[in-house]
């Protein structure tokens, strides 16, 4: 008896389109394609890349020139920040 009730309710629900089933879009609805006629010509990827590389090179140069190194008498590397102040020994890699 319960199976008859469940099947009747399911037929009613699906018949009225209330639940479960995905319906197709109404006739006349279309998908819009993006407008590709407007291109951003002010700033291209090549210019962006060139700016990023030049900024990176400037930071790397400032970092490289910010330290001064020399070799001690016993063959160890010494480093100091800037061009004044004491040299400190560089630790060996573990």
Image: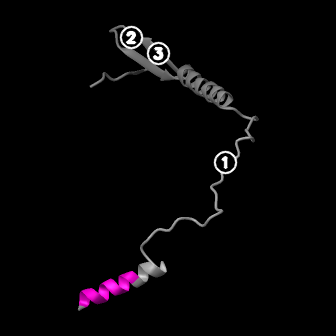
Q: In this view, does 56 lie above or below 7?
A: above
**Mark 1 or mark 3: whose residue is earlier in sequence:** 1
Tell me: 84 left or right of 45: left
Question: Given the current orientation, which residue lies at the most extreme bottom position?
Answer: 1
**Residue corresponding to mark 3:** 69
Quadrant containing the N terminus is bottom left
Q: Helix or strand or loop: what does disc 1 sit on?
A: loop
Identified at 66% across, 28% down, the residue is 51
- Answer with the quarter of the image where residue 73 lies: top left
Q: Helix or strand or loop: what does disc 3 sit on?
A: strand
* Between 11 and 94, the one nearer to me in the picture: 11
Residues packed near mark 3 inside 10 Å, few (<14), some (14 to 19) or many (20 plus): some
Residues packed near mark 2 inside 10 Å, few (<14), some (14 to 19) or many (20 plus): few
User: Could one spot residue 86 in this view of the protein?
Assistant: no
Identified at 44% across, 80% down, the residue is 15
Q: Helix or strand or loop: what does disc 2 sit on?
A: loop
Residues packed near mark 1 inside 10 Å, few (<14), some (14 to 19) or many (20 plus): few
* Between 40 and 66, the one nearer to me in the picture: 40
* Between 90 and 9, the one nearer to me in the picture: 9
Question: Given the current orientation, which residue lies at the most extreme left position?
Answer: 1
- Answer with the quarter of the image where residue 12 lies: bottom left
**Residue corresponding to mark 1:** 34
* Between 40 and 48, the one nearer to me in the picture: 40
Where residue 79 sits: x, y (%)?
Answer: 45, 20
**Residue corresponding to mark 2:** 72
Looking at the rendering, the stretch of residues picked out in magenta corresponds to 2-11
Identified at 37% across, 21% down, the residue is 90
Question: Disc 1 to disc 3, how far (Cα)?
Answer: 57 Å
**Mark 2 or mark 1: whose residue is earlier in sequence:** 1
Main SS of the magenta part reads helix
**Disc nearest the viewer among 2 and 1:** 1
């Amino acid at each position: 008896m319960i199976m008859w009730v469940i099947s009747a309710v399911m037929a009613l629900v699906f018949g009225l389109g209330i639940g479960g089933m995905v319906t197709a879009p109404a006739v006349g609805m279309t998908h819009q394609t993006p407008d590709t006629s407007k291109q951003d010509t002010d700033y291209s990827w090549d210019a962006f890349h060139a700016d990023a590389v030049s900024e990176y090179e400037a930071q790397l140069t400032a970092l490289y020139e910010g330290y001064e190194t020399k070799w001690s008498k016993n063959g160890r590397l010494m480093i100091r920040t800037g061009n004044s102040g004491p040299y400190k020994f560089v630790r060996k890699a573990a």
